[in-house]
Image: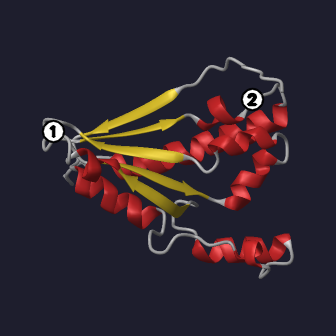
Amino acid sequence: MAKTVTSHNLQIVTFSTTLQFSEVTSRLDKQIGKGEALMLPGFKGGVTSKEDLQAHVSSMIGPSGFRYFNEFNHGAWLRLYNSSTPRVVVYVLGNPVIAQTMLQYDLRGAVNIPPRLLVLEKADDAGTDVVYHLPSSVIALSDNEKLRAAAEALDSKLEALVESITAVEKPAL
């Protein structure tokens, strides 16, 4: 048995907003087409080509280009230990078509695909934080320039999504 430990520079991105938790999660749900989790029929033999897969994924993707996969409501169980625990949910979202643009270069990136967003109610109820690992900092584990470019494209897509769900709309003049 061999064990290897590789150091890597993880970057954590936090967007803070004065919007309430329920508004941020409602916006996120709409942007990622939350409903039933995306099931890839290829795992059950229903997809026989990448074109079939792309068509299936495209039919289920939300306006952001991402799809809801799952969520973990940590706040619900943490309140059993401390009733003042703020709401905190981890969303798992993604797009297999985007994922393949990175995994074709380094399958180790799969440990961080699909990406996750932590939506955290501020303890003083003054708004919400949305936190995530910058994809390029956890997926581009090698010096492969094509992998880095694909991961940085995901950085941009994820940032656009989070900006859209945390933006405080300015009143019309």
- Taking 98 as reference, is 158 left or right? left
| Residue drawn at x 62%, y 77% as measured from the top left | 59
| Residue drawn at x 40%, y 33% as measured from the top left | 14
**Residue nearest the observer in this picture, 147 or 4:** 4
The amino acid pointed to by label 1 is: Ala
Q: Position of residue 118 (x, y in %)?
A: 40, 43
How far, Cα to Cα, is label 2 from label 1? 37 Å
**Whether residue 135 is situated above or below residue 103 in the rendered picture:** above
**Whether residue 154 is situated above or below residue 30 in the rendered picture:** above
Q: Position of residue 109 (x, y in %)?
A: 72, 40
Q: Check disc 2 and report the residue beneath it.
A: 141
- Asked if labels 1 and 2 touch by Cβ distance under 8 angstroms, the answer is no
Check disc 1 and report its element: helix, strand or loop: loop
Q: Quadrant of residue 83?
A: top left
**Whether residue 145 is situated above or below residue 56 in the rendered picture:** above
| Residue drawn at x 53%, y 56% as measured from the top left | 93
Mark 2 vs 1, N-terminal side: 1
Q: Badge 1: how crowded within 10 Å, few (<14), some, or many (20+)?
A: some
The amino acid pointed to by label 2 is: Leu
Q: Position of residue 97 (x, y in %)?
A: 72, 60
- Taking 122 as reference, is 142 left or right? right
Q: Check disc 1 and report the residue beneath it.
A: 126
Q: Residue reaching furthest bottom?
A: 46
Q: Let me know if residue 169 appears in the view.
A: no
Q: Residue reaching furthest front?
A: 1
